[in-house]
Image (cartoon, rainbow, N blue to C red):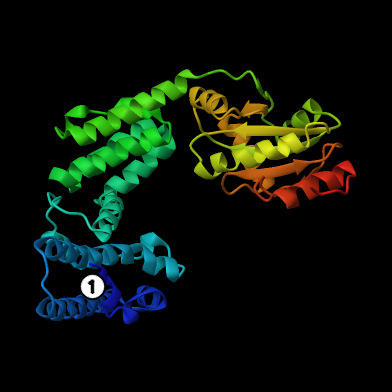
Amino acid sequence: MNKFNAELPNENYIYNHANEAEKNLSPEEYADFIKKREQEYYAFLDKLKKENKTTKLFDKWVNDKLKYESWRDLLRYRWTHPHYNGMQRDSFNLGESFFTFLRDYNMNDNELFSVVHTDFLDEYSIYSNEYPKDSVSKFVSTFQSEGAEKALPILKNMIDINTSGFTKELLLTKLYMNLLNAQEIGMFEAIYDSSFTHKSYFLNTIKKEYSKLRDYFSNQNMENANLSTIKSSVVSSLIDTIAQKYRDKIIYIDFWAPWCGPCIEEIPYSKDIQEYFKNDDVVFLFLANRCKEESWKSTISNKKLIGEHILLTDDQFNILAGLLNISGIPHYTLIDDKGNIVLKDAPRPSDKEKLIAEIERHLNKHQIP
């Protein structure tokens, strides 16, 4: 395997060359590009096998790798080409003929997994959720009008329609695990059906994660955090309410959610900054949104968060997002002791020196540790 990977004639197909092909080639040209690459790889493989004694395991691995590498990249092209060319995905229609290679896909192929086989399954998971087209629009409209719990069965049904066998079991397991990893336990319970598989590995993996999340949610000890609410839903009064609540103090606002990985990664840095300013008139205000109260409280408890915490309504978050130009979370904002927004997009806690300098500037301090 090492010899094959080390000596593979790959120069024309990696990094900039691959990106240029995805960007500049038409669908027909790109399919030919992938076919030519595969032919060169198989020619090299034939030469390698004539010069070296190979094992049955190697033969299975290399054929798995070459097949699924081609299929993965062909599936990727449906979104990389419009991405590199600044196109809307909806305007880039490849047509069914482009995906005829999938007719050869054995959905029960699970004897061996190369890395690219796993990559292919990730791409196929997304692809299977995109067809038929009317299901996609139905899912989006239902999600927007009625919420995720009503829309998720449509997504689940798309997996049922487009897959079978091992692939179907794998993608449904991935759907369930994504909900659990996002702490959406209510949504998981609403759609989960253990009869989708008899494979103990899938069932035990889901059961273990569900049990772990239930234990996580049971921890609601928030003795080191102050929880409160904001009643205002008008732009001016909403900001004024926050400023008045913490009158004469610098306010560092952290917009976050329990399901947001980058938000959680910033927590240890935030604790360090809070410790540094523990004797100063600085308030660390955590504004959460788009999460259930149970998930919000258990995350505060399990992560041992301190500071001030408010769970915003959707309307309140949308108002603040518009005012502060929030395009995603985590997002940070700095308000001075007069109630003025001095930084709509403040440094994050992991940018320690820059954040400390900004806060100290408004506290009239000059020393940075």
Q: How far from the left and from the top, in percent, is residue 329?
A: 57, 44
Q: How far from the left and from the top, in percent, is residue 134?
A: 28, 48
Q: Residue at x 30, y 78 (%)?
A: 10
Q: How far from the left and from the top, in percent, is residue 276?
A: 76, 38
Residue 186 visible somewhere in the drawing: no
Front position in the image: 244 or 220: 220
Q: Residue at x 17, y 54 (%)?
A: 112
Taking 217 as reference, is 75 above or below it? below
Residue 86 is left or right of residue 6, and the answer is right
Q: Residue at x 18, y 66 (%)?
A: 62
Location of the N terminus by quadrant is bottom left
Q: How far from the left and from the top, in percent, is residue 241?
A: 76, 28
Taking 223 as reference, is 348 above or below it? below
Residue 277 is left or right of residue 92, and the answer is right
Outermost residue toward the right in this view: 364
Instruction: Look at the numbered disc 1 and give the secondary structure of its residue.
Output: helix
Q: Could you tell me the amino acid type at mark 1? A: Phe
Front position in the image: 59 or 344: 59
Front position in the image: 295 or 265: 265
Residue 111 visible somewhere in the drawing: yes
Taking 330 as reference, is 195 above or below it? above
Q: Quadrant of residue 215?
A: top left
Residue identifier under label 1: 4
